[in-house]
Structure formats: structure tokens, C-alpha cells
Amino acid sequence: MKLFTCCLSLSVLCLTLLAVEVDAQEQGDQSGFISIDCGIPGNSNYTDKVTGINYVSDSEFTDAGESKTILPIHRSSSLDQQFLTLRSFPQGTRNCYTLKPAQGPGNRYLIRAQFMYGNYDSKGVLPKFDLYLGVEKWDTISFNKTTSEELSEIIHVPTSEYIHVCLVNTGLGTPFISSLELRYFNNSRYTAEFGSLQLFARLDFGETFGNYRFKDDIYDRKWNSIKYINSTLVYNFETWTYIGGNKVPYKVMTTAIAPDNSSNPLKLPWTPANASDQFLIYMYFSEVQTLQPNQTREFDIYLDGKPWSRRPVTPYNRSTVTVYSDALEKPAASHELVIQKTKRSTLPPILNAFELFTVKKFLQFQTDDQDTASMMDIKSVYKVQKGNWQGDPCATRAYAWNGIGCIYNVSDKPRITSLNLSASGLNGKIAPSISNLTMLRSLDLSDNNLSGDIPDFLSQLTLLRILNLKGNNFTGSVPSSLLSKSKSGLLLLSLDSSQEGGDTNRCLSSSCKKSTNKSTILIAVSIASVLVLILIAVIIILWMRSYKMRQAYIKDDSLETKKRQFTYSEIISITNNFEKIVGKGGFGTVYHGYVDDTQVAVKMLSATSVQGYKEFQTEAKLLMSIHHKNLTTLVGYCNEENKLGIIYEYIANGDLEGHLSGRNPYVLSWEQRILIAIDAAEGFEYLHHGCKPPIIHRDVKSTNILLTENFRGKLADFGLSRVIPFEGGSHVTTVVAGTPGYLDPEYYRSNRLTEKSDVYSFGIVLMEIITGRPAIGTSNDRGHIVEWVKSRLEEGDVEIIVDSRIRENVDMNSVWRTVEIALACVSTASDDRPTMDFVVSQLKESLSNDLCRSETRKKELVGVQSLNLESEVSGPQPR
Ligand SMILES: *[C@@H]1O[C@H](CO)[C@@H](O)[C@H](O)[C@H]1NC(C)=O
Ligand SMILES: *[C@@H]1O[C@H](CO)[C@@H](O)[C@H](O)[C@H]1NC(C)=O
Ligand SMILES: *[C@@H]1O[C@H](CO)[C@@H](O)[C@H](O)[C@H]1NC(C)=O
Ligand SMILES: *[C@@H]1O[C@H](CO)[C@@H](O)[C@H](O)[C@H]1NC(C)=O
Ligand SMILES: *[C@@H]1O[C@H](CO)[C@@H](O)[C@H](O)[C@H]1NC(C)=O
Ligand SMILES: *[C@@H]1O[C@H](CO)[C@@H](O)[C@H](O)[C@H]1NC(C)=O
Ligand SMILES: *[C@@H]1O[C@H](CO)[C@@H](O)[C@H](O)[C@H]1NC(C)=O
Ligand SMILES: *[C@@H]1O[C@H](CO)[C@@H](O)[C@H](O)[C@H]1NC(C)=O
Ligand SMILES: *[C@@H]1O[C@H](CO)[C@@H](O)[C@H](O)[C@H]1NC(C)=O
Ligand SMILES: *[C@@H]1O[C@H](CO)[C@@H](O)[C@H](O)[C@H]1NC(C)=O
């Protein structure tokens, strides 16, 4: 074996010239081939008489479509057997073949789909449809006549184990396919650097021997033999002992064209389908004549009028010289290659073979391989008939499989987060492959005919938060691991009412009654009744309080510290005679002002409102004794006869509710929202655990979270706050107070106030932050936010609950985490709610997820402050 390598440097590009490449693939070896003849009977196979290629039926690769045969009149004797049958897809918009090549992802494959209409449907109308590779469009297939043989071919390096070839109906006729071939293409000469290479032309110049493919071409490239205008055929009949270059078959290389008139150049013009297409060119040369000592053949190559080969090319005897682009050619409306002999050349230029590729970039990720494998298994085990369960499960949003929800990341493969197989006619046991859907958050298997045990592996799905198993025929007990997760609030577990009793005394299926949606109804009823009662209660409380307050008066000793006391006349000068109102609360008006050069907010109790005295007193007292970066700072107070005022630091960006409701046009990003939630949660954590005795805010709501200049959160309005005396244990019994929509139902029922009441209200705030909806829906969309969120989640998709203004720019992992925290906070039983320090740590993790993602997207959404957080994220918080 002879090795022959040299390099031609060209002015525009460096072109490599080489002769021989040693390859492991042997002639006649079909081990890297998948050859599908579409439409032949299931499980049949045959060996093609001309090529010797073994074709198999397509039944293993698709479960859609109908098998069809072209009309006999179009069966010419020269027609390839693969065109006789086809598969057509009258049902559904998108139907797919799924291939799983043994060599796996990261390798080069040649993928070729062929089509011939042959009036198989006797309609005589030529269809037009799209061809997809994975989740992105590859080509549009159309026909000039009934017997046109159309071909799409691509050299592609998949990033997933599964290669999906899909036919998409675009409303211009029923898609069909005649054959689908995949060849493991271990040939590094075809660069994958710029993207996938879509075949534009592959020409064998000279007409002597006809078209070549396998076994002449070990890769089964199809060489199109053509006669070229204004050229003569030159050839030799010598049989080569080795194959050079890109292993172009020697039969292809033994013929060439030369210009008619030997002093003319050879011209190859072509017009791209799209002027913005970028080409890669491969040209193959080999000497086909025996040269005399006084003869030379040497030529230059020009592309679009500019020199393309920097040095002259000389074809070699008995070997192939390949001249090819090593960078994308400049796009143009039309192109022309000109091969011109040099001055010293005595012979005209020749050209043996030629390939043109356009570069196609497939940038979108396919679904994670393990998730895909699980879905393929679920599909085949249950024989799911869901219409669009074709190709990639998450695909693009438009073609995602019915019943699944996915996280789409910019920089990573989509993952499946929810699976809704409710009422899908599933029989048998719960498929073990579900345990491989490791990112699953929500699983709905309700109303099927599933039987057997409820498997323990469901509890190993660590992220699973919603599990609905109602309306099935399970036997045995519910795994205790699932029950304990459910009890600890980590899992919303829905079982038939008869199964809810516990792990020991579960009835057998035969005696189980048909399930009713008991728990959902309970939630709905309790929330509705709670809301009505809360409203009544609040009215009564307010009335009672104002009655009491009318008799109340403020003693000076209640505000012990006199240092920060201001006179009323000082207040007038601070506020410039109450010039600028920045807010109005229930008990008074808030004015803007300056103490020295510092901006302040001054809350004045309105003269007519006596019921606020106690709140004022509480707040001033409390703020004087506590201090934290996430609580509004007290600057001072005024207590002069009937003039009562509190002076706080001025917080520039108003309250959180204003930003969520849209009253304030600035839209908070997801990162900003989570940072604000962390700030607030840290404020509450300080009140609950940092203060001795602990303090309960009692009026946690989005209007009481203020936003600084940098959109960081600070808690405000401590008017209703209560100190829990040590002797009283962890709770205090009080008259119920708070704001409708945020009020802890347990506190409402029992009058027992604990820190968990704040946790409940904070859960409502978190839901507002996620959804951008108010705690209680307005006008046409009434209902409590908890109810709203839970019912949407039961539909399986977390994305739809996210505030539509930011939905496109959130990391769904971070959303899921935050939703989980919120759901845990609003647990009906206060024991099931987390403490604030846990909430803080969880929110920080949710943020760190999101920061990682933002970093990969090279976005600086969060800014310096939040990045500081990263160091705090790991490890427990110092107490
Ligand atoms: C082809 O079909 C025969 C039976 O008709 C079977 O034994 C053989 O395994 C099949 N080959 C392939 C590659 O499917
Ligand atoms: C269809 O026919 C026209 C004219 O005969 C020709 O220019 C065009 O290239 C053909 N298209 C295809 C896809 O063969
Ligand atoms: C692919 O080709 C290279 C040489 O080009 C060879 O070393 C390698 O073993 C081949 N891989 C396979 C799987 O045939
Ligand atoms: C072929 O030659 C004729 C006459 O020399 C010329 O007009 C025509 O453009 C040539 N065609 C091509 C494709 O070069
Ligand atoms: C070949 O081309 C040259 C220059 O274009 C011309 O002078 C000559 O007559 C041509 N010869 C023939 C045989 O056409
Ligand atoms: C040509 O390609 C560009 C970029 O790929 C695309 O935006 C445009 O729609 C294409 N035009 C046609 C006519 O297909
Ligand atoms: C090359 O040499 C041959 C004889 O070997 C002669 O007939 C021919 O004219 C020569 N050609 C040139 C261009 O000198
Ligand atoms: C081409 O190969 C033949 C046969 O081996 C040899 O006789 C001849 O000299 C070679 N020609 C050139 C230009 O290398
Ligand atoms: C889960 O996936 C692994 C590899 O990804 C595979 O080996 C295993 O068989 C799968 N388990 C099930 C139950 O499908
Ligand atoms: C439930 O399963 C039992 C056996 O496990 C069977 O006898 C019964 O018919 C099943 N019920 C339904 C509704 O399928």
C-alpha cells in the first residue's frame, strides 16, 4: 500500500490534498448499516440483487402509517426494488422513524431517505411535505413527476443515542417514504466542524459505467454518473489495486471530463436553493491517460472568479487527489468553479468526481437518552395510543408527546418532569422503567386498570412531588416510604379513598369502592368556607378593635427610648409640611421626607383613625428593640398629644405587590423574585429564631415586603406583630388577625398563633411571586391562589403557573423547587410546614440552580449582590 500526501495552500483557504486513508471498514461489510425498505411486510427482509444490501421491513422502526405499493404501470425494470413499496402517513401531523445505531452518539453517520410517489394512492397528485432530523427541519420533499426519485442525504454526528427521522404534513399532501438508510460513516475527511453536511450534488463525470454505490463504495455513497456539456470523456480501464482519497470507488475515478476545446477551461456553475446556503466543496482528480515524457497536466481552480487553489493541481497516476474546502465558502446567489490549465501544462484540465454539501446546523437538543429510553419502554409496554407519541418525547414544545411535561434548558438536553397517563387504558403493573425518569416531579396514573403492588421504586424518585394513583386496581399495601413522604408534606399523594387509611389496613381491590375526588373537594370546600369566615371575622375584629381603641391612650413610658423622639414641628420640617405622599395604609398616610440628607418615610396616624394606636405603639416598640438587614429600620418616632408618627428609612422601589400586580411597570426577573423571597424569609427567620423571645409578624403579605433600590426585600409593618412569651411555650392564643387570603386556616380555627402561621402566609407570598397572581383572584377568575396552583399542577405542567411575563426566561428546575417550598409552606397542618430557616436554605438552593444556568447563558441578570450569596449557599447557616 502506497501513501501519498501533499498539501496545497490556497489563497482563500487551505486545501488538503491527500491520496490514501487507511480504514478499518472492509469492502462488503454491512455491520454499520441500517437498511430499511419502507412498506414491505412486517419482519420480512431480503437481499437486493444489484447491490447485495440486506433490507429489512420498517415495522421495528415506526408504529404509524400504512403500507402501500406503487402502481404497476410505474414499475420499470431498472427501478430499484426499494421504490416498489412505501409507507404513507395519512394520520397525524408528524410521524417518525426511530433508529438506534449500535456505534452510538458522537460518531458520523450518513443518513439517506428516498422517495418515489408512483401514484400509490391512485390520486395522481404529487405531495409536498417536510422531513425532520431529530427535532429540527432537514429538508422539504417535492416531486416533478410521478416517477421522480427524490433523495435527501445528510452526514450527521448525533448527540443522542436515538436518531429520529420524521415526516411532517404541511397541508400539501400526505407524507410518505420509500426507503431509509443509515451508514456508519467512519470517514474523518468529511468534517463535522461546521455542522451536518447535507448533500447537494455527488457527481461521477463520465457516462461509461453507470451509477455506483455499495459494494463499489464501501460507505454506500450514491455516485450520480453524468455527461457534461461542452466536455469530452477521458478514461482509463486500468483496475486499481488501492482506493485513495475519500475512498472514492476506482470505477468512479477511472473516468473524467476534459473541455471540448483543450485551450478552454472546464466550468461548473450551480445555483443554491437558498442564496444564504453555505457550501463545502470536494473535488477528486486522478490521471486517466498515460502521459508522454514531454506532456504535463496542471491546472488552477477558481471559485466565483477568485483563485481557489493557491498552487496548481496535478492529478496523479493510480491515486486520487482530493481538493476540498476547509472552511465554509462565501454564500452567493450563484456559484461557478472554473478549472483552467496553467501556462506550462500541455494537456487540458480534467475532473473525475465532485461533491457539494450545504452545511446545516442542528442546534436543538434532543431529550435526555435515559428519559427517551424510558418513554419508549412505557410506550411499548402499555401500547399507548396517544396519537403524537412519535419521535423525540420532548421534541420542540409544539410536538412534545401528549401528557408529558419537559424542562427545556438552553444549554442542555430537555428532561421529562411530568407524566400524565390518566385514563389512558393502561393494563398490568406499574412499569419499572418509570423509575428511570429521574427528573419526574409529577406522575398521574389515575383512572387506568393498573394492578399489582404499588412499587417502592416510586419513592426513589427523589423529586417526585405529585403522585396520583386513584382509580386503579392495586393490591397490597402502599409502601411506607411513600406514605411517610406524603405525611412530611414532600409528596401530594392521591390514592383511592379506601387506600388512604394507612399502610396496614388497606382493603383489597375487590372491596374497594370507586374513588371520588374526596381530597380535592375537601380542599375546595375548606378554602371557600375559610375565606367567607375570614372575611366575617376580620370585619368583627376590626369593629371590636376600633371600639376598644377609642378608649385607649398612649402612655409615654411605652416608648422608652427618648433618643430618637422627634417633635411634631420637626416632623413638619422633615416632610416639608407633608408635601409628598408615598403611600396610604389602613391606619394612616406615609410621607416622604429627609432627616439630614437621608431620605425617610414618615407614617402618620390619621387624626380620625383611633384604631391604629395600638399597632403604632407595637411597631415602634418592636422596631426599636430589633435590627436586621431585611427589616425596615426605624429612624425615630413622634408622640405628641394626638400626633403620632413613625419615621423609617426610605425604601425606594415600593412594595412587592405593586411589582407583581403590574401596577409598577418594571417586571421583576425570576432571579430578582427569588432574591426578594430569600430576603423576606431571612427577615422572618430572624424574627422567629433570632429574637428572644420570638416574634410573629402576623401580617405577612406582599404589600408588607418593600423593595430597595437594588430590588432587595425588606419586611415592613409590624403593627400586628406579637411576641411569644417564653412561659407560653411555642404559641400564644390571640384574637385572630391578619389579611384575608394570607391567613393560616389552622390559626383561624384554633386561635393558636405560632411561627408556622407566618410560614403559611409566606407560602402564599411565594405563590404570588411565582404566578404574578393575587392571593385571592379578582373579578372573573375568583378563587384562592393555593387552589389555583394545585389544580394547575395536577394537570401536570408547572410551566403554565409561572407569571406569563417571565415564563420564557425561567429555569424550570428553579421553579419546581420554589413551587415545592410554597406547597410545603401552605400545608394545612402547621406541623407539616417547614421552619423559616429550612425555607431560606431551600430558596438559596433554588437560586443556585438558577445562577448556574444563567452563567452558562452568559447573562448577568443577577448582579453582584446575589453572586455574593453563592458562598453562603453551601453548608448550614450559622446560628
Ligand atoms: C430475515 O428473515 C429470516 C426469515 O425469513 C430470518 O431468519 C432472518 O433472521 C432475517 N434477517 C434479518 C436481518 O432480519
Ligand atoms: C423540475 O423540473 C424543472 C423543469 O423541468 C427543473 O428545472 C427542476 O430542477 C426540477 N426539479 C426537481 C426537483 O427535479
Ligand atoms: C474509524 O476509523 C479510524 C481510522 O480512520 C480507525 O482507527 C477506527 O478504528 C475506526 N473505527 C471503527 C469503529 O471502525
Ligand atoms: C458550451 O459551449 C457553447 C459554445 O461554445 C457556449 O455557448 C455555452 O455557454 C457552453 N456551455 C457551458 C455550460 O459552458
Ligand atoms: C479553441 O478555442 C480557441 C480559443 O478560444 C480558438 O481559438 C480555437 O479556434 C478553438 N478550437 C476549436 C477547434 O474550436
Ligand atoms: C434562506 O435561508 C435563510 C437562513 O437560513 C432563511 O432565513 C430563509 O428563510 C431561507 N429562504 C428561503 C427562500 O428558504
Ligand atoms: C511530444 O513527443 C512526441 C513524440 O514522442 C511528439 O510527437 C509530440 O509532438 C511532442 N509534443 C510536444 C507538444 O512537444
Ligand atoms: C502511470 O502508471 C503507469 C503504469 O504503472 C506507468 O507506466 C506510468 O509511467 C505512470 N505515469 C505517470 C505519469 O506516473
Ligand atoms: C434504567 O436505565 C439504565 C441505563 O440508563 C438501564 O441499564 C436500566 O435497564 C434502566 N432500567 C429500567 C427499569 O428500564
Ligand atoms: C381487580 O383485580 C382482581 C384480581 O387482582 C380481579 O379479580 C378484578 O376483576 C379486578 N377488577 C377490575 C375492575 O379490573
Image (cartoon, rainbow, N blue to C red):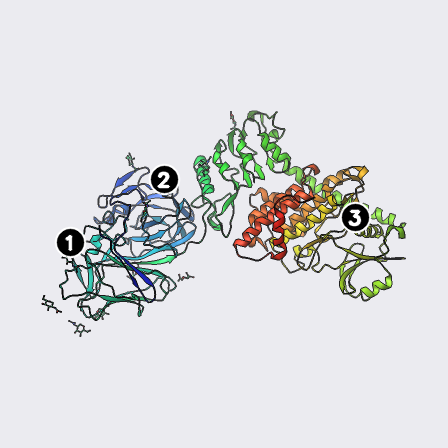
Q: Is residue 130 above or below residue 275?
A: above
The residue pinned by badge 3 equals: 720
**Secondary structure beneath label 2:** helix
Instruction: Write down which quadrant ligand 8 falls in.
Output: bottom left
Cα separation, mark 1 vs mark 2, equals 44 Å
Choose top left, top right, bottom left or bottom right for residue 667: bottom right
Residue 385: percent from the left, percent from the top?
A: 45, 40
Amino acid found under the numbered disc labelled 3? Leu
Cβ at disc 2 under 8 Å from ligand 1? no
Residue that badge 1 annotates: 238
Query: What amino acid is at disc 2?
Result: Glu
Residue at mark 3 to residue at mark 2: CA–CA distance:
69 Å
The x, y position of residue 873, in whole percent, is 62, 47
Q: Which mark is residue 662?
A: none
Does any atom of ligand 8 lie closer than 8 Å to the CB of label 1? yes
Image: 328 above or below 383: below
- Tell me the number on the disc at residue 60: 2
As rendered, which of 485 and 850 lies closer to the eye?
Answer: 850
